[in-house]
Amino acid sequence: MKKILTLSTALGALALPAAADDITVMGWGGAYANSHIEAYFKPFEAATGNKVISVDSDNPATPLKAQVEANNVTMDIAVLEIADAVRLCDEGLIIPIDPAILPAGADGTAAADDFLPGTVTECMIPTDIFATVIGYDASKFAEGEGPKTMADFFDTTKFPGKRGVRKSPKVTLEMALMADGVPASEVYATLSTPEGVDRAFAKLDTIKKDSVFWEAGAQPPQLLADGEVVMTIAYNGRIFNAAHQEGKPFEIMWDGQVYDWEGMVVPKGAPNEAGALELIKFATSSEASAKAAEFISYGPPRKSAAALVGNIQGSDQPMLPNLPTAPDNMTNALASSLEFWADRDTELGERFNAWLAAN
Amino acid sequence: MTSVPQPSAAPAAAALTTSDGRPLKAALAAAGARARRRAFLLVLPLLAFVVITFVIPIGQMLYQSVYHPGFANNAPAIAAWFDANPTGTEPDEAAYAALAEDFRQMQANKTAGEAGTRINYTLPETRSLITKTARAAQSLAPPYKEAFLAVDAKWADPGVWQAMRSSASAYTSDFYLAALDFERAPDGSIKRVEEKKRVYVTLFVKTFLLSLMITAICLLLAFPIAHLLATLPMAKANLLMILVLLPFWTSLLVRTTSWIVLLQEQGVVNSLLVYLGAVGDDGRLRLIYNQTGTIIVMTHILLPFMVLPLYSVMRVIPPSYARAARSLGATSWTTFRRIYLPQTLPGIGAGALLVFILAVGYYITPALVGGADGQLISNLIDFHMDKSNWSMAAALSAMLLVGVLLLYWLYDRLIGIDNLKLG
């Protein structure tokens, strides 16, 4: 019975049949897919002669699930967020990848030691690290007087003005606790207790009436540009783009950043599994991931790659200070917990929605 | 001449026949059947299309609201133990042994995530318990109870066992319970969830109330416009009609975003009000990212759905009726209330039904402009779709569907569904 549903879902994701050696990669589109095309696919095609086809999706996890369950897999690689990758891996929809196949780092460090701890999981090899941060409009504050810590974001007396808040408990609750004085290392332990959850919501209560809630990642830079908010929770890449490509006076406060990572997975039953693994080896090398970081401000997950990151594409400014993985930006950073959100996503999501709806 | 039978002279019992001698009744029936077959063949492609792309997927989706085999398929041994022992039985060594067997199987088939996901819907924080235990499955040895407790002390929690019991059957009412803000207590009884987690019933009520309000505002705004359109000369009416249809042809997202530009605090409307001195610069009105925003933008987007049916009905109302009423001494109010309004009812009914049903399921507009309190139930359906919890999304959708059908039935009882004119 379920087959029919997944089949009809998969019908919507029909791709043109690819030649045997072609590798189809389903990514997220936009600047992010562009960084993959420039840094991974084009050099890979030049080196091996195999064509890479880039397909866009809202979130490749959804079509991947539908395609595997319908036994009609058209993609060889999907680019996923780590939470989705772990879930699909547990459900057996994507294949385990042996990290031993990965090449050593540019400085000779073995792959196992080169990747940031915890980022390589059973089924996914990470390609980049992105962070949820506080972005603010520097022109609204006196020189050097912008917010410095997460507590400042929640302090509307010292920093009056509206706040942009993501309409989701994930990251929002973590930031609320860090603002309330919980050290990054204890955030998830605190959030695992009912008192901790209440404490986070109590902290959110303090800015609820000053909050503008956003849903899509494109909204926060727009809210800043329109003057609707003076600071907002945002994805670092979006703020970077607005600042560097559109010349907006936006800056990022890295204190209390919550980082997540994305990477490549191979669905079960991929038409060109061998080719997919070759491309993954190529794309997750130090050189390729450092190159990708020049196109988009997502940090390479390999430590050895930091030294290789050059200037922002098409400019003479170094990219490194804009990356979540730059040492200066990592002083008070929290790695988003997969385990925690896999367990509590629905429950806290409902609680968050109830909190939103309450007056 | 005399051999030709005269119909009037024919005996009453003799049936009418066609020229080739077949009974007329049979011939007519055959011709009718042929025509029906042809008509059926003509609609067959559409019927097949609707069945394949609409009826089957929707049916499947709704089926998922009561059917989730994630745990049942992967834990047959413990399901058998649950069947043999009534609710409330303290899990014994046999239960733990059965569970150990299931976990070994889950580990071998890599299905612990699927099973854990299902239980997690009923009791949060059990997904990691299941995956963690599955990873340790090979080291589980008798006595099993101690072995399980060594992996995680939560295995002694009766709540976990109750959650497993209710997930052990592929058919479940858990999703409907959750959609009504209820949950199962560890002893199997049903209770309401804590107050701070209740959200669905409130949102259902809010969705229906907001939709009613939007329908009412649409009607108030559309009625005069439709009347004007219907009474103006054709050339002017067509021009006005284009103005009504123009937003209809513009992308929904563009219109929603335009409203954001207009209504936000630094937006056109507020800046104008500040310029005119109606509000102070620090007292700018909050017109968007809240319930007000949702109502304003949805009213605008749904307005053409009210104008068009009203217009099509009003256009054919003969003006002579109203003139007759006036000439017989009715005041203009009486004429409107007793002569004009009743004749527009089919249009009002159709428009109201269209707008209401569209509003109840609206998603993207409240998501973009609804802020905290302008959310509708469809935003929660999306939330669960996003979390791959299709069963919960299906349960909420089914309840929404039932709600709409109930109102439809009520409408049929009060006004009559045949008294509906869509255009």
Image: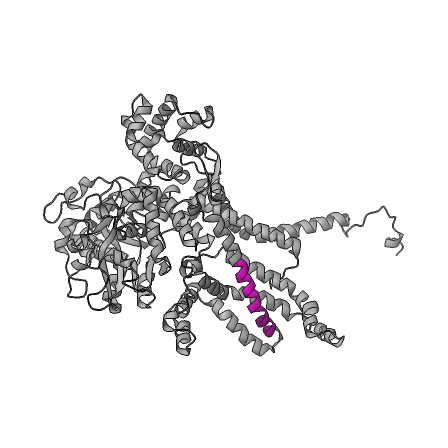
Q: Quadrant of the C terminus of chain B?
A: bottom right
Residue A217, how many percent across, how many down? 32, 58
Q: Quadrant of the N terminus of chain B?
A: bottom right
Please state if B2 lies on the left or on the right of A300 as rendered: right
Residue B251, how many percent across, how many down? 44, 65
Magenta extent: B211-229
Residue B144, how many percent across, how many down? 32, 23
Closer to the camera, A261 or A333? A333
Residue B39, how many percent across, how many down? 62, 53
Q: Is residue B285 visible?
A: yes
Q: Quadrant of residue B352?
A: bottom right
Confirm whether the magenta stretch covers residue B225: yes
Q: Is residue B6 visible?
A: no
Closer to the camera, B320 or A271? B320
> Which secondary structure dominates the residues rendered in magenta?
helix
Q: Quadrant of residue A146?
A: bottom left
